């Protein structure tokens, strides 16, 4: 049964656990996202369960136990393409475009799962332009630079017109100016389309610059959650995440 809290929140996760053999990649993770908060960051040491959370949220893996309710819909046992149709799209930590398709076709095939051919073409052209990939539309994605591969990954996810976009370290390995450019475009698109973003990121500067709220994971558990500065100043977070005990 869906409770009142689950109905009014954007996303409600209850006691989500993901086990890989003896490893609890997520250990009873619970959190409610208000509809009001549009940009949340997730940080945590390597192996703390961040990507696992995205994989389970997007239906790529099934939880061992727990519940996921998105905009009043129980998505816990839905398949990934069904979850995408409900409005959740993700990027992959390691970009994985279809290399048998062109850059344009990668975005177009994603859009086509949701809209007509004409609209899919318009959407693809629009996003490629916004991410400055329009002049590279007909090349193979394997020829793209790292930053362009990341942009293609975001354009592909956005082409499915999500209500919630999950970004898994899309800024990793980018130069400061590239980080700023990518954040600016994502921010513009978010403002225009009013979707929610949850962003896994190791770049604290980007988190501070972009996010309204933060979730901190350690060993599959949430150790802090709330306003960014409050979480970053939390003693447990400083100890676990930065090694700083002062
Ligand atoms: N398919 C899998 N099989 C077995 N163990 C896995 C699998 N996927 C993840 N794990 C383990 O689950 C834990 C969490 O992994 P996860 O990829 O979610 O971490 P992460 O926080 O995204 O780390 P990183 O910052 O390095 O990307 C790690 O111990 C990892 O080794
Ligand atoms: Mg990861």
Image (cartoon, grey):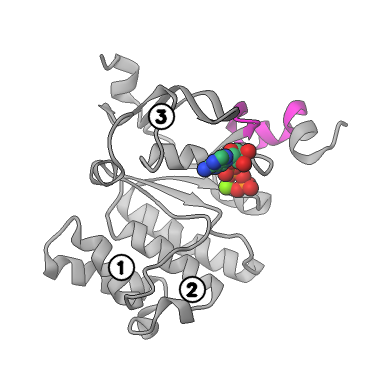
Q: Name the secondary structure under disc 1.
A: helix
* Residue count near mark 3 (Cα–Cα under 10 Å), binned few <14, some 14–19, many ≥20: some
Label 1 crowd (10 A; few <14 / some 14-19 / many >=20): many
Label 2 within 8 A of ligand 2 by Cβ = no
Q: Is residue 188 above or below residue 46?
A: below
Determine contact: label 1, label 2, CB under 8 Å: no
Whole-number angstrom distance, CA of label 3 to CA of label 1: 30 Å
From the image, tell me which residue sits under label 2. Answer: 148
Closest to the observer, 69 or 232: 69
Chain part drawn in magenta: 217-237
What residue is shown at x 69% (from left), y 41% (from top)?
A: 45
N-terminal of the two: label 3 or label 1? 3
Horizontal side of residue 153 vs 237, given as left or right: left
> Which of the image's four quarters has the C terminus?
top right
Local secondary structure at mark 2 = helix
Q: CA distance from mark 1 to mark 2?
A: 13 Å
Residue 82 rendering spot, x and y as whole percentages: 24, 42
Indicate which disc residue 34 carries: 3
Q: Mark 1 vs mark 2: which is more N-terminal?
A: 1
Disc 1 target residue = 107
Which quarter of the rendering shows the N terminus?
A: top left
Across and down, in percent, residue 157 comes to 35, 57
The one nearer the camera, 164 or 230, is 164
Residue 138 lies, with reference to residue 246, above or below; the image says below
Q: Residue at x 67, y 49 (%)?
A: 204
120 in relation to 75, above or below? below
Q: Residue furthest right?
A: 246
């Amino acid at each position: 049964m869906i409770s009142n809290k689950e109905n009014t929140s954007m996303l409600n996760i209850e006691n989500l656990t993901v086990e890989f053999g003896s490893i609890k990649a997520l250990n009873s993770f619970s959190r409610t996202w208000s509809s009001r908060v549009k940009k949340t960051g997730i940080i945590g040491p390597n192996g703390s369960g961040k990507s696992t959370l995205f994989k389970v949220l997007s239906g790529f893996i099934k939880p061992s136990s727990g519940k996921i309710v998105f905009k009043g819909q129980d998505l816990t046992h839905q398949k990934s393409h069904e979850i995408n149709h409900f409005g959740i799209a993700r990027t992959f930590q390691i970009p994985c475009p279809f290399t048998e398709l062109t850059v344009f076709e990668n975005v177009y095939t994603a859009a086509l799962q949701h809209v007509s051919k004409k609209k899919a073409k318009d959407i693809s052209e629009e996003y490629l332009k916004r991410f400055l990939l329009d002049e590279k539309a007909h090349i193979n994605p394997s020829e793209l630079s790292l930053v362009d591969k990341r942009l293609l990954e975001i354009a592909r996810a956005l082409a499915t017109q999500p209500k919630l976009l999950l970004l898994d370290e899309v800024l990793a390995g980018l130069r400061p100016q590239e980080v700023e450019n990518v954040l600016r475009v994502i921010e513009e698109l978010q403002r225009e389309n009013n979707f929610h973003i949850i962003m896994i990121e190791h770049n604290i500067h980007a988190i501070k610059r972009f996010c309204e709220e933060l979730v901190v994971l350690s060993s599959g558990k949430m150790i802090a959650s709330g306003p960014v500065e409050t979480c970053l100043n939390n003693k447990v977070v400083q100890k676990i995440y930065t090694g700083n005990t002062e």
